[in-house]
Amino acid sequence: MKWLVDDEPLFVLPTVAVKLGLNESIFLQQLHYWLTKSTHTYDGHVWVYNTYEGWQKQFPFWSESTIRRTIVRLEKKGIVVSRYRSKLDKTKWYRIDYDVLANVMHGEEERQNDDTNAQHKQTTRQHDVSHASICQDGRRKMNRQTNITTDDTLQNMIQFYEQNGFGKMSSYVKEKMALWVSETSKEMVLDALNVALQNGVKTWTYTEGILRNWKKNGYVTTKERKRRPVRTEMIPEWLHIDYAQYERKACSEAELEQKRRELEARLKKKRA
């Protein structure tokens, strides 16, 4: 296709940048590159999977929110098509609708007839209605082995999250939580939420930091994490002293004044 090239360097084509925007052009070219390498075929199209964090590693000069906005703008134009694996597993797959891209680049998207638009909308509705079953079949065809959370597991996590003051769980948190369950286990995610709760920092960012630290240390299951050595701290003797036995002696103003004079005299003598 003349607007996209099959090559590794990260670059931008001026024609596409002018029509779609600079960020959109860079992301679209990178997505096209990975599609040429992908072997995941479903519904007659080639798909690639990535997380927003994964995209950021490829675009370190963008924030996660910038990447999210860029993808959403391309999705609204119909150029990028994305699908989640299921309602519970928020693994996201992407592909490019090259026909829509061609129409946009030719400036013909506004002149498409009503029948084409109606057919596109009907196809979209059909995809949404049958989304759960389609993604369930897609898991096997895309050859990706993932531990998917069950209805009970997700419900328990949402209930724990919201009832313990973490706030209303957003779709973004659900997506990240499902990915961590896939990479570790549901017990590890619940343990991390418990640690965050005990430390009084009830945010998903802090919880995810705990999970990253555990993964960095090689703990991918609760059993492995609990086997780590426990450091024993020596308790100082003064901690056992009952200070209640000592009574505070009250001093009169005259005694305080006398002590102040004695202190000033000692300081004056020391300076001399």
Image: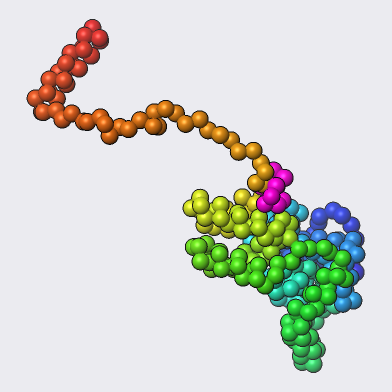
Q: Residue at x 80, y 78 (%)?
A: 134
136 or 262: nearer the viewer:
136
Q: Quadrant of residue 151?
A: bottom right
Image x and y of residue 250, in percent: 15, 30
Q: How many marks?
A: 0
Image x and y of residue 34, in percent: 85, 61
Q: Residue at x 72, y 45 (%)?
A: 218
Q: Quadrant of residue 244?
A: top left
Q: Residue at x 61, y 55 (%)?
A: 191
Tell me the quadrant of the picture where the C terminus can be found.
Answer: top left
Image x and y of residue 4, in percent: 86, 65
19 or 270: nearer the viewer:
270
From this view, report whether residue 59 is shown above or below residue 129.
above
Residue sitting at the far bottom: 115
Image x and y of residue 187, in percent: 66, 58
Tell me the quadrant of the picture where the N terminus can be found.
Answer: bottom right
Q: Quadrant of residue 112?
A: bottom right
Is 7 inside the magenta-drawn segment? no
199 or 49: nearer the viewer:
199
Any part of residue 246 in sight:
yes
Q: How is the image coloured?
A: rainbow
Instruction: Judge left or right: residue 238 versus residue 54.
Output: left
Instruction: Judge left or right: residue 125 versus residue 238.
Output: right
Any part of residue 67 in sight:
no
Residue sitting at the far left: 254
Q: Residue at x 79, y 89 (%)?
A: 119
Instruction: Judge left or right: residue 126 versus residue 191.
Output: right
Is 221 inside the magenta-drawn segment? yes
The span shown in magenta is 213-224
From this view, report whether residue 85 is shown above or below residue 128.
above
